[in-house]
């Protein structure tokens, strides 16, 4: 699939270090999850290159922070334009290494680029404050200044958007960034970096350290331990987030963590069932269930339970599973064999504990790499099943039954996670009660998709710290300074 790129120079396999493409001392393989085919051998960098990138970023910082906000805005705007101009090629690279259907990959390019556009605009709105003095010969000011060298560790499920959502606000604020992309999807990251260079982002301001999984851990340690790095932004599992947080404690680093979710999706008796079925499908099966905001648990009220599960299972049966490059496919492969096994384990556990498979339920071994799992709906789900407490991160939809609003709220909140949640109701009183009671950073009411660049994305509890996107998204990359002037 990569032979068909309109601009083959977007296919970079070397890492970006201080404006140079470096090949590293060895390489690691990147595969197509749909076919198992080898796509590329990518530079495998290690701790030494991480130290070099941090030093180069620190050296580049003064010149970058001294550019005007408008200059940074213009560079970001050029980067946005280039990302959109190359939307098709970026999507091809993404589908090849990540597996998501091509149309979804194009959607991610537009979504990812929108953060660059948004923060190009926000760069110009980093305003300080003047405060009333406590004595007339003083003047009190609040400045906002760039925090310093930033690090970003990103996941494979959104190979482009999780980079731009972190890098664009950092650059807009006047900070350099060292990125360590996921080892499963480095090619998208490198293509995005190539376009950043073409946009005029100076050498030293943006580094992409590609690495295999062992070196990712080693690089992570260097980024966390460095006292030069003042901010670490991570999107990935809660398990790794905890490790990074502990590693950042000695240098008291500012952290942005976007971790796992266990999203509930509640359908009340008064919901519009057809709309709920559409929303349920969109929320559950995007990226074959591999997003942190994908629904993990469906709670449906007794009065509409049978109607909902039957319509939902019928809708899920229309899904087309296959290679993301094939026409009409809306369910690609899972990212790796371990992901398929996790879904299988959750399905088998649910069946053993009384779950009823309405559709799917097994791996589709006849397809390509064998990393395909049939979109699955399991009715009569129960709280002691694994899928109730663990994030499946795959195409399994367990449907639980409930009687009262209070019971649904308690079940939805009975988790250590708190990222996205969804519910369907037409009752305005209930919409406010439930919307306020859900312990989640994001609540979708009568919608199954809610992310966009100008809203605050993030979670509570063990789903993370901080918010990305929106006008809040740049705050993380700024320090507040109080200036007290006397003798006026
Ligand atoms: P996912 O659940 O998306 O696979 P992970 O949390 O395992 O997420 O990985 C997300 C990112 O974190 C990837 O870039 C990966 O290389 C990196 N990573 C995984 N483990 C560590 C670690 N111990 N230290 C630093 N980075 C890590």
Image (spheres, rainbow, N blue to C red):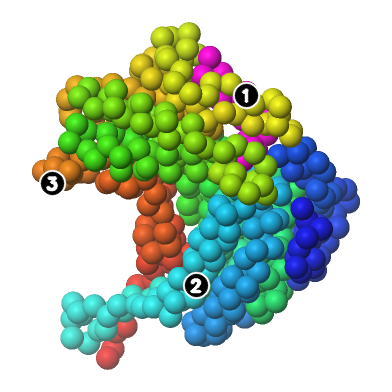
- The quarter holding residue 29 reads top right
The residue at 39%/78% (across/down) is 125
- Can residue 159 be seen from the camera position used here? no
Nearer the camera: disc 1 or disc 3: 1
x, y percentage for residue 448? Answer: 37, 45
**Left or right side of 453 for 253:** right
- Can residue 321 be seen from the camera position used here? yes
The residue at 57%/28% (across/down) is 374
- The quarter holding residue 306 reads top left
Q: Can residue 282 be found in the magenta stretch?
A: no
Badge 1 residue CB within 8 Å of ligand 1: no
The residue at 30%/43% (across/down) is 275
Q: Nearer the viewer, residue 312 or 302?
A: 312
- Position of 455 relative to 153 (above/below): below
Mainly helix, strand or loop, the magenta region?
Answer: helix
Q: Quote the CA–CA distance across marks 2 and 1.
A: 40 Å
x, y percentage for residue 84? Answer: 59, 70
Q: Badge 3: how crowded within 10 Å, few (<14), some, or many (20+)?
A: few
Q: Quote the CA–CA distance across marks 1 and 3.
A: 42 Å
Badge 2 residue CB within 8 Å of ligand 1: no
Specify the quadrant that holds the C terminus: bottom left
Asked whether the beta carbons under mark 1 and mark 3 sit within 8 Å of each other, the answer is no
Which residue is denoted by mark 3 in the rendering?
Answer: 428
The magenta stretch is: 332-348
For numbered disc 3, what is the local secondary structure? helix
x, y percentage for residue 102? Answer: 62, 53
Q: Residue lying furthest bottom in this view? A: 488
Nearer the camera: disc 2 or disc 1: 1
x, y percentage for residue 318? Answer: 49, 36
- Position of 361 relative to 90 (above/below): above
Which residue is denoted by mark 1 in the rendering?
Answer: 363
């Amino acid at each position: 699939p990569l032979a068909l790129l309109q601009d083959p120079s977007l296919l970079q396999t070397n890492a970006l270090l201080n404006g140079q493409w470096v090949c590293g001392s060895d390489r690691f393989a990147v595969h197509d999850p749909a076919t198992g085919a080898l796509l590329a051998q990518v530079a495998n960098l290690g701790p030494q290159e991480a130290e070099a990138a941090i030093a180069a970023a620190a050296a580049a910082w003064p010149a970058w922070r001294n550019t005007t906000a408008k200059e940074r805005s213009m560079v970001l705007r050029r980067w946005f334009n280039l990302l959109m101009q190359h939307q098709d090629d970026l999507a091809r690279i993404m589908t090849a290494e990540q597996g998501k259907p091509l149309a979804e990959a194009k959607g991610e390019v537009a979504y990812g680029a929108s953060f660059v556009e948004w923060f190009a605009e926000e760069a110009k709105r980093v305003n300080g404050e003047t405060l009333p003095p406590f004595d007339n010969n003083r003047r009190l000011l609040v400045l906002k200044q760039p925090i310093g060298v930033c690090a970003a560790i990103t996941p494979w499920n959104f190979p482009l958007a999780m980079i731009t959502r972190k890098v664009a606000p950092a650059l807009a604020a006047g900070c350099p960034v060292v990125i360590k992309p996921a080892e499963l999807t480095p090619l998208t990251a490198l293509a995005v970096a190539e376009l950043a260079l073409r946009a005029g982002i100076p050498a030293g301001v943006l580094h992409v350290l590609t690495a295999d999984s062992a070196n990712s851990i080693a690089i992570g340690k260097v980024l966390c331990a460095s006292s030069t790095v003042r901010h670490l932004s991570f999107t990935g599992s809660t398990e790794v987030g905890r490790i990074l947080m502990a590693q950042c404690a000695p240098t008291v680093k500012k952290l942005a963590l976007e971790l796992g979710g266990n999203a509930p999706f509640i359908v009340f008796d008064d919901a519009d069932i057809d709309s709920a079925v559409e929303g349920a499908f969109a929320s559950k099966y995007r990226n074959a269930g591999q997003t942190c905001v994908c629904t993990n648990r469906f709670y449906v009220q007794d009065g509409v339970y049978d109607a909902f599960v039957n319509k939902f299972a019928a809708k899920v049966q229309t899904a087309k599973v296959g290679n993301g490059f094939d026409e009409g496919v809306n369910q690609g492969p899972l990212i790796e064999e371990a992901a398929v096994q996790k879904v299988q384990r959750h399905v088998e556990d649910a069946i053993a504990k009384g779950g009823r498979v309405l559709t799917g339920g097994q791996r589709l071994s006849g397809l390509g790499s064998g990393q395909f799992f049939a979109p699955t709906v399991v009715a009569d789900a129960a709280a002691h099943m694994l899928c109730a407490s663990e994030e499946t991160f795959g195409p399994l939809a367990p449907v639980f039954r409930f009687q009262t609003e209070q019971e649904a709220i308690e079940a939805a909140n009975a988790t250590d996670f708190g990222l996205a949640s969804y519910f369907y109701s037409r009752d305005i009183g209930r919409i406010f009660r439930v919307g306020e009671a859900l312990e989640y950073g994001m609540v979708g009411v009568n919608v199954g998709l809610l992310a966009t660049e100008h809203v605050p994305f993030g979670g509570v509890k063990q789903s993370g710290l901080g918010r990305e996107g929106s006008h809040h998204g740049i705050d993380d990359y700024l320090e507040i300074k109080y200036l007290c002037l006397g003798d006026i």
